[in-house]
C-alpha cells in the first residue's frame, strides 16, 4: 500500500514532537498507557449510554508485553478501539486528540462524567523517542474488521487491513538500537517497566498487567527426608503492577493511620512515620484532592540550596510533576504529599503546568488548610506540636521576616517562645490571654539562652511586677518582633525600651532631676569612652544593677551581633548599633565613680568608667576588644 504523509506539516513538526516537547524519554510509557486508559474509559462510558455495548468493568485491562528477542514493547488494551476513519484522523494528523473530540461530542454536561486524560493528541508520538518503528493494530468495538497503522517517523505511515480477534488496540514499539548515549534496551526489562508504571501510572483506574519473574521456594515434597534442602525456582506469572485506587481517593474514615504512614514512608523515602497527616478536597470552581504530610524531623538538606520543595502533582491519577513548587508557600516548604485534580491546565507535554488561576486557587486552599491543621495540632496534642516546632519552628520564623512581614497574619498563631513563666513554651495567644492587670505590652528580651535572659539587669523591673517575658534566644527572633510589631492589639516591646513601663508625672520629674544632677558624671563618661558610645545616660530601665548597654535607632544590639557574623559575606556585615551606656545613679558603683570625680581623682574615675563599660559589654554578650587589658585594669583597682 502507498505510504501516506502526515497532514500536520511533515518532518519539522515530527522532530519537534520527538525531541523538544518531552524532557525525559521514559515519559513515553506514561503517554501510551494513558491513551490505553482513555480507550477503556470511552468504552465504559458508552456501555452506560448505549445498550448495544455489553461489557463488564472487571474484564477491562491494559497489558504490557516486552519481547527481548523481537526487541518490541507492546501496550494492549481492550477498550473502544478505532475504525479505519478514526485511525486516519487520530494518528494521521499530529496534535489531533480523539479523546478531546470524544469529550466535545458528549457536550459539557456529560463530559465531566468521563474522566479522560488525553487532550492534546501528541502523547502517542512520544513513542518515537525510543522507537524506530511503531505499529498500531486496532479493532473498533462493534465492528468485524481490524486495521494496522505503521510508521517509522516523519516519512509517513501506512494503513492496511489486518486480523484481530478482540476489539481494542495494540501499540507495538520496535525499540531503537542502543548507542553510547542511550540504552533503549532498558525498556524491555520487566523491573524497569514496573518501576516506570509505579512512578507514573500507579493510579490509572484500570489494571495494568504484565508477566514478571518471581523467585520463590518450591513446595517441600511429602516424602522428603530430614536431610531435605529447600529448592528455589523462577516462576513467570502475570501480575497487576499498579495500585489503581489512590489512597487519597478513599474516605479518611476508611483508611488506617498505618496505611497513611506506610504510604508516606515508601513514597517519600523517610524511615520515620509522619508527624501529622492532612487530607483535604474541594469541589466547585476547582476540583482537587490532596494528601499531605508533616515530617517528624528536619530533612538533612532542608537548609541547603539543594533542597527542593513541592508536592507530587497528579492529573486524573497520572503523575504530571514530581515536585510542583507552586502549590506550596516557602513557609510550609517542609510539607510533603500529593495533589490530584482533573482541572489542571497542562502544557502540551503534560510535564509542566501552565500558571493559571486554578493553580493559585489550590495553592491558597492548601496554605489555609495546613495552617489550620497545625493550629489544631497545637491545641489537641501539645507534645507533638512542640516536636514539630523543634524541627520547623525556625523555618516559620524566617518566613515571617521575609517580604516585609507579608506572611505574619498567616504564621503568628503558630509561633512558640520560651517565657519567664516556668521556662515553658507558649504561643503569643496564650501569652496575651494571661497578661497581668495593667499590662499594656507583650514584653521580650534577647539573650543567648533562657537562663541568661532571666538574669539580665533590664529584666528585673518587669519581672518584679509579675509580668511574663518572652525569652528570645535565636538570631532571627528580634527580626520576627520587628515584623510582627503587635499581636491581638498588644504592642511588642523590648524590656530595654525606655518606654517599656508607663511613668507618672512625679516619676518623670524625678528622672529629670537625677539626669541633671548626674550630668557632670555623664559628660565625663562620654569624654572617656569617646566614639565607643553615642551617649551615656541615666537609665530608666535599671532597678538595682549598676549598668547596661542599649542602642538608639532602628538597629538593636542583637541585630549588630547578627550582622557582624555576615562581615565579608554581605554588604550589611560590620554594621554597628548606636550604643548607649545606661547608668543607675542609685547604685554603689555610680556613687564610687562620682566620689572619684568629686575628689578630682580622674585617673581612678576613668578606670571605673572602663570597668563599667566592659561590664555592660559582657552583660550584652558583646565582644571585649582586649580581654587581657581589661583583666589588668580590674586587678589594678585591687591594689
Image: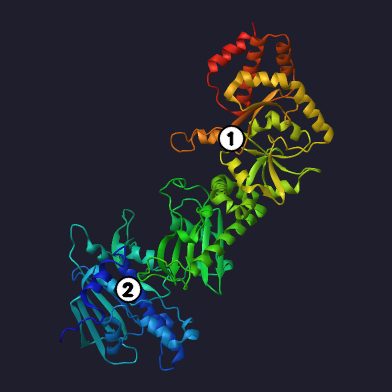
In front of the other: label 2 or label 1? 1
Q: Is residue 225 in view?
A: yes
Classify mark 2: residues with Cα within 10 Å, few (<14), some (14-19) or many (20+). Answer: many
Q: Residue at x 49, y 60 (%)?
A: 337
Q: Is residue 238 in view?
A: no
Which image quarter: residue 581? top right
Q: Quadrant of the N terminus?
A: bottom left
* Mark 2, residue position: 123
Q: Residue at x 61, y 39 (%)?
A: 554
In what element is the residue under mark 2?
helix
Residue at far right of view: 506
Q: On screen, 507 above or below 169?
A: above
Q: x%, y% of residue 78?
A: 34, 82
* Mark 1, residue position: 558
Q: CA distance from mark 2 to mark 1?
A: 58 Å
Q: x%, y% of residue 513?
A: 79, 26
Which image quarter: residue 630? top right
Q: On screen, 35 above or below 480?
A: below
Who is closer to the viewer here, 488 or 235?
Answer: 488
Q: x%, y% of residue 44?
A: 42, 84
Q: Residue at x 64, y 5 (%)?
A: 639
Number of numbered discs present? 2
Amino acid at each position: 500500500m502507498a505510504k501516506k504523509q502526515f497532514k500536520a506539516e511533515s518532518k519539522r513538526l515530527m522532530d519537534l514532537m520527538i525531541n523538544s516537547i518531552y524532557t525525559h524519554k521514559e515519559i513515553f510509557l506514561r503517554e501510551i498507557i494513558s491513551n490505553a486508559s482513555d480507550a477503556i474509559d470511552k468504552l465504559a462510558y458508552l456501555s452506560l449510554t448505549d445498550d448495544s455495548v455489553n461489557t463488564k468493568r472487571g474484564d477491562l485491562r491494559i497489558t504490557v508485553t516486552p519481547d527481548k528477542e523481537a526487541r518490541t514493547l507492546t501496550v494492549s488494551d481492550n477498550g473502544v478501539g478505532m475504525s479505519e476513519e478514526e485511525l486516519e484522523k487520530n494518528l494521521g494528523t499530529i496534535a489531533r486528540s480523539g479523546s478531546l473530540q470524544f469529550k466535545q461530542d458528549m457536550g459539557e454536561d456529560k463530559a465531566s462524567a468521563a474522566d479522560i486524560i488525553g487532550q492534546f493528541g501528541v502523547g502517542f508520538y512520544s513513542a518515537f523517542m525510543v522507537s524506530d518503528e511503531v505499529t498500531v493494530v486496532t479493532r473498533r468495538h462493534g465492528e468485524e474488521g481490524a486495521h494496522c497503522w505503521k510508521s517509522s517517523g516523519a516519512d509517513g505511515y501506512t494503513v492496511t487491513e489486518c486480523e484481530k480477534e478482540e476489539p481494542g488496540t495494540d501499540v507495538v514499539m520496535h525499540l531503537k538500537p542502543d548507542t553510547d548515549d542511550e540504552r533503549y534496551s532498558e525498556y524491555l526489562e520487566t523491573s524497569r517497566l514496573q518501576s516506570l508504571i509505579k512512578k507514573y501510572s500507579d493510579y490509572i483506574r484500570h489494571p495494568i498487567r504484565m508477566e514478571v519473574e518471581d523467585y520463590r521456594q518450591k513446595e517441600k515434597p511429602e516424602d522428603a527426608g530430614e536431610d531435605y534442602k529447600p529448592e528455589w525456582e523462577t516462576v513467570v506469572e502475570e501480575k497487576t503492577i499498579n495500585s489503581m485506587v489512590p489512597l487519597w481517593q478513599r474516605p479518611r474514615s476508611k483508611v488506617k493511620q498505618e496505611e497513611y504512614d506506610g504510604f508516606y514512608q515508601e513514597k517519600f523515602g523517610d524511615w520515620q512515620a509522619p508527624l501529622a497527616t492532612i487530607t483535604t478536597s474541594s469541589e466547585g470552581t476547582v476540583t482537587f484532592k490532596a494528601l499531605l504530610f508533616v515530617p517528624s524531623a528536619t530533612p538533612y538538606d532542608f537548609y541547603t540550596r539543594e533542597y527542593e520543595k513541592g508536592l507530587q502533582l497528579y492529573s486524573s491519577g497520572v503523575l504530571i510533576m514530581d515536585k510542583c513548587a507552586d502549590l506550596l508557600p516557602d513557609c510550609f516548604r517542609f510539607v510533603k504529599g500529593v495533589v490530584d485534580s482533573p482541572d489542571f491546565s497542562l502544557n502540551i507535554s503534560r510535564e509542566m503546568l501552565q500558571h493559571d488561576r486554578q493553580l493559585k486557587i489550590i495553592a491558597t486552599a492548601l496554605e489555609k488548610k495546613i495552617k489550620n491543621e497545625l493550629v489544631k495540632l497545637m491545641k489537641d496534642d501539645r507534645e507533638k506540636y512542640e516536636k514539630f516546632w523543634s524541627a520547623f519552628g525556625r523555618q516559620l520564623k524566617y518566613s515571617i521576616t521575609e517580604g516585609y512581614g507579608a506572611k505574619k497574619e498567616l504564621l503568628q498563631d503558630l509561633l512558640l517562645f520560651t517565657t519567664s513563666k516556668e521556662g515553658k513554651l507558649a504561643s503569643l495567644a496564650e501569652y496575651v490571654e494571661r497578661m497581668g492587670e495593667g499590662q499594656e505590652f507583650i514584653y521580650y528580651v534577647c539573650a543567648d539562652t533562657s537562663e541568661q535572659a532571666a538574669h539580665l539587669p533590664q529584666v528585673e523591673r518587669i519581672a518584679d511586677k509579675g509580668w511574663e517575658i518572652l525569652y528570645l534566644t535565636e538570631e532571627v527572633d528580634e527580626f520576627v518582633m520587628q515584623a510582627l510589631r503587635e499581636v491581638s492589639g498588644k504592642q511588642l516591646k523590648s524590656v530595654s525600651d525606655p518606654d517599656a513601663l508607663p511613668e507618672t508625672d512625679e516619676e518623670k520629674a524625678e528622672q529629670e532631676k537625677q539626669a541633671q544632677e548626674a550630668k557632670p558624671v555623664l559628660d565625663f563618661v562620654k569624654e572617656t569612652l569617646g566614639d565607643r558610645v553615642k551617649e551615656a545616660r541615666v537609665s530608666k530601665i535599671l532597678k538595682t544593677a549598676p549598668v547596661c548597654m542599649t542602642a538608639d535607632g532602628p538597629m538593636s544590639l542583637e541585630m549588630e551581633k547578627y550582622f557582624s557574623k555576615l562581615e565579608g559575606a554581605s554588604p550589611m556585615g560590620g554594621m554597628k548599633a548606636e550604643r548607649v551606656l545606661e547608668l543607675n545613679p542609685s547604685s554603689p558603683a555610680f556613687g564610687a565613680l562620682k566620689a572619684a570625680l568629686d575628689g578630682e581623682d580622674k585617673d581612678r574615675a576613668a578606670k571605673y568608667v572602663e570597668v563599667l563599660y566592659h561590664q555592660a559589654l559582657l552583660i550584652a554578650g558583646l565582644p571585649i576588644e582586649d580581654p587581657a587589658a581589661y583583666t589588668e585594669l580590674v586587678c589594678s583597682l585591687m591594689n
